[in-house]
Every structure is written in C-alpha cells, then in structure tokens.
Image (cartoon, rainbow, N blue to C red):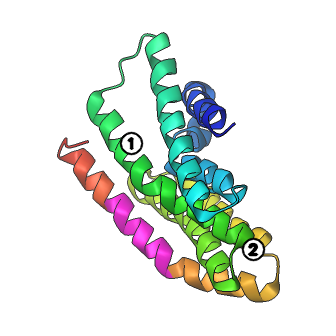
Amino acid sequence: MVVLAGLALGVLTLFGQGILPGSWNHFANSGAMWLLGAFLAGSVMPTYRWASAAGVVVLFGALLGYSLAALAMGYVYPFVYVAFWGSISIVGGPVFGSAGHAWRSGSLRQGVIGLSLLGAVFAAEGWYIVQYNQDLLAGALFIMIGVLLAVFLAGSARKRLYTLLVMLPLTGLGMGVFALISRLSKIRIL
C-alpha cells in the first residue's frame, strides 16, 4: 500500500502541475505535500523503524511515479533532479515518517515535535512561495495550512500551544533550507 501511495502521489503531482491554474499550481508542485505523504504513511506504522522506512518508500515511490509518468508523456526528467529529490527522500522520508509515528504514538514531547515539523514545512514553503515566487495568495495558504495542521491535529489545548511554539524555530530552519535550495538553483547546481 505504501508503494502504491507513493506512486500515486508522484503521478498526481505531474498531472496536477499540468491542470491547476495560477496560485493553485503550487499545491501540485510542493515538497511539503510529498512530505505530508511520508508523515501520513509513518503515522499508521507500528514502530519508528517501520515509520522511517515507510516515509522513504513513499517519497521514492512518488519520485518514481512522477518520473515514469513524465517519461510516458514524452518528457525527460533530468538526472540531476532525480538525484536531488532522491537525496531529499533519503533524508526527509525517515524524518517525516518518524514524525508521523511520533504524532500518533509518541509521548507528548514526541508528538509535539512530530506535528511541529509538519506544520513548519508548510509554513516555510509558504514563506518561500511569497519570497521567491511573489505569490502572496499561495504563500498565505501554505502558511495557514501549516498553522491549521498544528491546531487541528494537536488534540488538546496544551499540545496545540506547545506545537505552535515549537513550530516557530522549525519554520525558521525550514526557511533556511528553502533559501539554500533557491541559491543552488540559481547557480545551476539544481
């Protein structure tokens, strides 16, 4: 099921990029959405080890689904992009798969950190969209999704408050990662 979910995520990403107009296209072209897939897969796994593996499998499945669908449509997906997103899968898969497991099965502290990571990646991508794509609507929606995920998935007022507080520095860290990716793109490394 995890492999199929990853493949479907990749194929849906490619098709979404082709049909979603304007600001909505950011939702199909989003690393946060892929990491949400890893988070959700990890949330249903029985252990951190399984959650970590599920996160990697979802992200590699998404990359494979995207690449194969692009190839079937006549597009050649450059190897440097496959290598880059494969690297992201190796790092982001275990982190966000484990974050999902922590949210569902961990202690208060683990659940707060797991949920904060998810909210922060959406908020950081929202900042990136505003900063680099100059799209205030899409950026604001991503930030709002990050906050709403933290609020609605927290479960209690105490966990909600802690999650929002922990989300702040994690969002700053995510903003730094997005800025680095943007710089690498400008010098043609990506």
Residue 113 horizontal/vertical position (percent): 59, 77
Q: Name the residue type under label 2.
A: Val
Mark nearer the N terminus (1 vs 2): 1
Q: Residues within 10 Å of mark 1 (few under 14, many from 20)?
A: some
Residue 173 vertical position relative to residue 62 in the rendered view, above or below: below
Label 2, secondary structure: give it. helix
* Nearer the observer, 44 or 145: 44
Looking at the rendering, which quadrant does residue 5 occupy? top right
| Residue pictured at 56% horizontal, 69% vertical | 117
Q: Residue at x 58, y 49 (%)?
A: 54
Q: Residue 190, how many percent across, how many down?
A: 26, 42
Mark sitting on residue 85:
1
Identified by mark 1, the residue type is Trp
| Magenta portion: prevailing SS class | helix
Query: What is the span of residues highlighted in magenta in the rendered image?
Result: 169-179
| Label 2 environment density (alpha carbons within 10 Å; few <14, some 14–19, many ≥20) | some
Q: Which mark is residue 151?
A: 2
Image quarter where the N terminus lies is top right
Which element is circle 1 on? Answer: helix
Q: Quadrant of residue 42?
A: bottom right
Drawn side of residue 45 relative to residue 117, left or right: right
The correct choice, above or below, for 49 with respect to 28 in the image is: below
Residue 152 is one of the magenta-drawn residues:
no
Q: Is residue 171 magenta?
A: yes
User: In the rendered image, is residue 41 in sight?
Assistant: yes
